[in-house]
Amino acid sequence: MPFKPRRRAFAVLTAAGLIAAVGAAAAHSATNPIKAGRFEGTTSQLDASGKPEPVTFRLKRGGRAATNFVALWSARCDNGQTFSSDTRLRHIALTKQHSFSTAGAYSAVFQDGSGYSAQIRGSVSGHLRRDGSAAGTLMLTATVSDQHGTRVTACATPRISFRAKSG
């Protein structure tokens, strides 16, 4: 069985906190506000056609949180296959220094009818710049199990960097 579930069909993290934001939410300095809005960019990973994978998120008004963070990624598995998915984070708190960091885990079921599932663990960190850009990194692992719960393979990304701009 290939380990390539349909992208964007994977689990969406709940606001109940499957991924816990690290760092206290705080208002940005009034002298150095960063404009709220949508950020779009790319990661250091390339898709099958050789194009950089996308990353997007929204900065809430007041600059206290990034919301709707979405990054597509691929991980190399110990059985030689590639596991591709996306990670979606509903809310990541920002510090006074305009940085963010979160880590956690979630489960997802393959959308191909195989009964396979994956336990995905990961971390995302980054910072916003006064010029309206953002940069950061993410790292993820996935443990794939069959319909009986037997481990099939383990997969891991390298450290993936991302850059995004508001606009």
Image: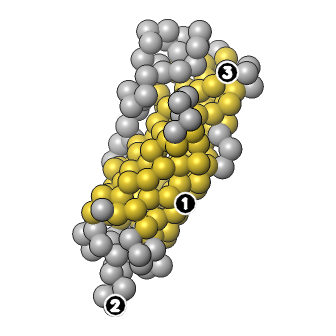
Whether residue 139 sits left or right of residue 14 in the image: it is right
Alpha-carbon span between mark 2 and mark 3: 50 Å
The single residue placed furthest to the front in the displayed view is 50
Q: Is residue 121 visible?
A: no
Query: Within 10 angstroms of label 3, few (less than 14), some, or many (20 or more) residues?
Result: some
Which mark, by number, is residue 31? 2
Q: Residues within 10 Å of mark 1 (few under 14, many from 20)?
A: some
Q: How far is disc 1 from disc 2 in space, using C-alphas?
A: 24 Å
Q: Looking at the picture, which amino acid does disc 2 mark? A: Thr
Seen at 34% across and 76% down, the residue is: 34
Q: Quadrant of residue 82?
A: top right
- Horizontal and vertical percent for residue 164? 44, 59
Identify the residue at the far left of this view.
Answer: 61
Please report the residue visible at 49 percent of the width from the left and 9 percent of the height from the top: 114
Q: Secondary structure beneath disc 3? A: loop
Q: In the rendering, at what x and y percent does residue 144 appear? A: 61, 23
Tag 3: amino acid? Gln
The residue beneath circle 3 is 81
Query: What residue appears at the point 53 percent right and 15 percent down from the top-left corner?
Result: 116
**Residue occupied by mark 1:** 136
Q: In front here: 101 or 50?
A: 50
